[in-house]
Image (cartoon, helix red, strand yellow):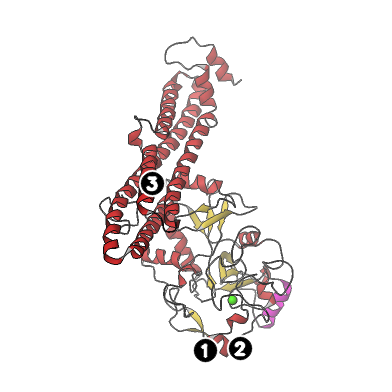
């Protein structure tokens, strides 16, 4: 038994004084009270999931009996709101009651700290302050969840009117399609609200979901960090952009994005900041790479309109990628960066190639320059291809088009070269690759001239380029249609 607890038991029992149970509660503050707090946090996260599931189910129903499904959704949402809303705290929401009980217990214990032995007051008070702060954050999130439900309920009423009008105007199918689209947008908004860069505005109750991106105040940072730390391969951390992050083996507190950053993500960044990444990108043209007006938005891949959104963003430099990370940090408060060279290696695994030990790649290994690439200028210029290999994409492919690797990461081999934090040195490469470069008159890489790129791209077919160990290099400001990036999220203590 702790020394001061023994001492306390000998104190005369006076009103307001610390009893043995109080002492144990304070002493075990990071166990019992925090366990209760954690359980509540998990329940709140479960409520958010339930809210998402309501909409997912509603959108997914084929030919739903809308009046029935509508009233079901309204009832479920109302229940969810009541369960979550702090205003119902005195009338029976389990959540709020438990939260209030926890708060009251912390207040009670705090009032008893002065009667503790002098040497114990400071640490005990600190422990209680910490858990009180955590409970406050939880209260805010619970309130936000209630508000979001309320807002959605209000919008559902409006959609109902809109739907009935649209049936008259354009028929049931079109009306249903419009409704699904609205529900889909609402779902996106809710998912975004759970993470939230730049979403710190209040809901516009009189507006539609489409009017404002913000649903509610962003999820408090400590909760985001906690969620990220608890992420697993089965349950990744999903950030405000909908990007999924998995724990990086061998690097506690670091998570890596399962996919390359998409055009749609970069679009959000540019829309929010007016960042200009359009100048000077090199794209593959007649006779080689040229500055021909290509940009991340249109890398001259002959995309159909609207097709590129899920492709990896290309024509973005290392500097552009870092600016993107800064923007995400400013919105979400989480620390994003590019992977270090070693972290990228950890995600790729120990095999010689991203798909295993043998060359050439088996079918489905990745988006490389297979025979499908022989279109347009590629065909005319007779760049090398992997004879006998074929994937679906002549240029970039939507991220996650191929199977993930054993650790759950997509496109670590192929699609686009990925920028890393490190400066490039030729000696990072295998000896035979170093020899090739040296024969071409290349020095040691210049120390602080070029950044490392990993993973190969849609343009690559050479055995050396397809090795997991191969490092390409580029000046930090260089934009090119074979290069993109992938994010790392750092939630280590003290980071
Ligand atoms: Ca390909």
**Circle 2: element type:** loop
- Asked if the residues shown at circle 2 and circle 1 are in contact, with their CB atoms under 8 angstroms apart, the answer is no
**Residue holding disc 2:** 382
What label does residue 286 carry, if any?
1
Asked if residue 143 shows in the view, the reply is: no
Asked if residue 241 shows in the view, the reply is: yes
Q: Which one is nearer the viewer's eye here, 104 or 480?
A: 104
- Could you tell which of marks 3 and 2 lies nearer the N-terminus? 3
Image point (37%, 61%), residue name: 181
Image point (39%, 68%), residue name: 275
What label does residue 38 carry, if any?
none
The image quarter in which residue 430 lies: bottom right
Q: Which residues are magenta?
A: 430-441
Image point (59%, 69%), residue name: 452
- Could you tell which of marks 2 and 1 lies nearer the N-terminus? 1
The image quarter in which residue 100 lies: top left
Image quarter (top left, top right, bottom left or bottom right) of the N terminus: top right
Q: Is mark 2 within 8 Å of ligand 1?
A: no
Find out whether residue 335 is within the magenta segment.
no
- Could you tell which of marks 3 and 1 lies nearer the N-terminus? 3
Q: Residues within 10 Å of mark 2 (few under 14, many from 20)?
A: few
In the image, residue 381 sits, relative to residue 2, either above or below, namely: below
Does residue 494 appear to the left or right of 181 in the view shown? right
In the image, residue 213 sits, relative to residue 100, either above or below, namely: below
The span from disc 2 to disc 1 (Cα, nearest Å) is 11 Å
**Residue holding disc 3:** 72
- Asked if the residues shown at circle 3 and circle 1 are in contact, with their CB atoms under 8 angstroms apart, the answer is no
Residue 198 horizontal/vertical position (percent): 37, 55
Q: Main secondary structure of the magenta part?
A: helix
**Circle 1: element type:** loop
In the image, residue 252 sits, relative to residue 449, either above or below, namely: above
Quadrant holding ligand 1? bottom right
């Amino acid at each position: 038994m702790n020394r001061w607890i023994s001492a306390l038991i000998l104190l005369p029992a006076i009103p307001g004084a610390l009893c043995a149970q109080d002492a144990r509660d304070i002493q075990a503050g990071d166990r019992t009270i925090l366990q209760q707090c954690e359980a509540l946090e998990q329940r709140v996260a479960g409520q958010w999931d339930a809210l998402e599931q309501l909409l997912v189910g509603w959108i997914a129903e084929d030919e739903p009996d809308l009046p029935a499904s509508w009233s079901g959704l309204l009832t479920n949402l109302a229940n969810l709101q009541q369960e979550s809303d702090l205003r119902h705290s005195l009338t029976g929401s389990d959540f709020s009651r438990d939260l209030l009980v926890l708060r009251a217990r912390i207040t009670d214990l705090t009032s008893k700290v002065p009667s503790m032995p002098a040497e114990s007051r400071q640490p005990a008070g600190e422990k209680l302050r910490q858990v009180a702060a955590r409970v406050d954050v939880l209260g805010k999130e619970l309130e936000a969840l209630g508000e979001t439900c309320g807002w959605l309920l209000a919008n559902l009423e409006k959609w109902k009117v809109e739907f009935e009008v649209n049936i008259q105007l354009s028929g049931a199918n079109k009306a249903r399609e419009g409704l699904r689209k609205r529900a889909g947008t609402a779902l996106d908004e809710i998912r975004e609200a759970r993470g939230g860069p730049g979403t710190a505005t209040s809901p516009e109750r009189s507006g539609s979901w489409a009017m404002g991106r913000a649903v509610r105040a962003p999820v408090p940072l400590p909760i985001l960090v906690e969620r990220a730390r608890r992420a697993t391969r089965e349950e990744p951390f999903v950030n405000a952009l909908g990007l999924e992050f998995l724990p990086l083996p061998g690097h506690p507190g670091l998570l890596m994005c399962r996919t390359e950053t998409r055009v749609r993500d970069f679009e959000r960044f540019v829309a929010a900041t007016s960042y200009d990444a359009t100048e000077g990108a090199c794209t593959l043209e007649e006779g080689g790479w040229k500055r021909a007006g290509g940009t991340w938005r249109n890398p001259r891949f002959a995309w159909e309109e609207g097709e590129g959104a899920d492709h990896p963003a290309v024509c973005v430099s290392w500097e552009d990628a870092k600016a993107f990370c800064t923007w995400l940090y400013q919105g979400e408060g989480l620390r994003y960066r590019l992977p270090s060279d070693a972290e990228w290696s950890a995600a790729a695994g120990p095999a010689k190639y991203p798909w295993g030990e043998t060359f050439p790649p088996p079918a489905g290994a990745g988006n490389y320059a297979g025979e499908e690439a022989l279109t347009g200028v590629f065909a005319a210029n007779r760049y090398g291809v992997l004879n006998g290999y074929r994937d679906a994409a002549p240029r970039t492919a939507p991220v996650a088009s191929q199977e993930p690797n054993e650790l759950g990461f997509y496109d670590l081999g192929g699609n686009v070269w990925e920028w890393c934090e490190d400066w490039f040195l030729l000696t990072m490469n295998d000896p035979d690759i170093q020899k090739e470069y040296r024969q071409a008159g290349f020095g040691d890489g210049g120390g602080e001239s070029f950044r490392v790129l990993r993973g190969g791209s849609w343009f690559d077919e050479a055995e050396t380029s397809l090795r997991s160990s191969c490092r390409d290099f580029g000046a930090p400001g260089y934009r090119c249609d074979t290069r993109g990036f992938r994010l790392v999220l750092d939630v280590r203590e003290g980071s």
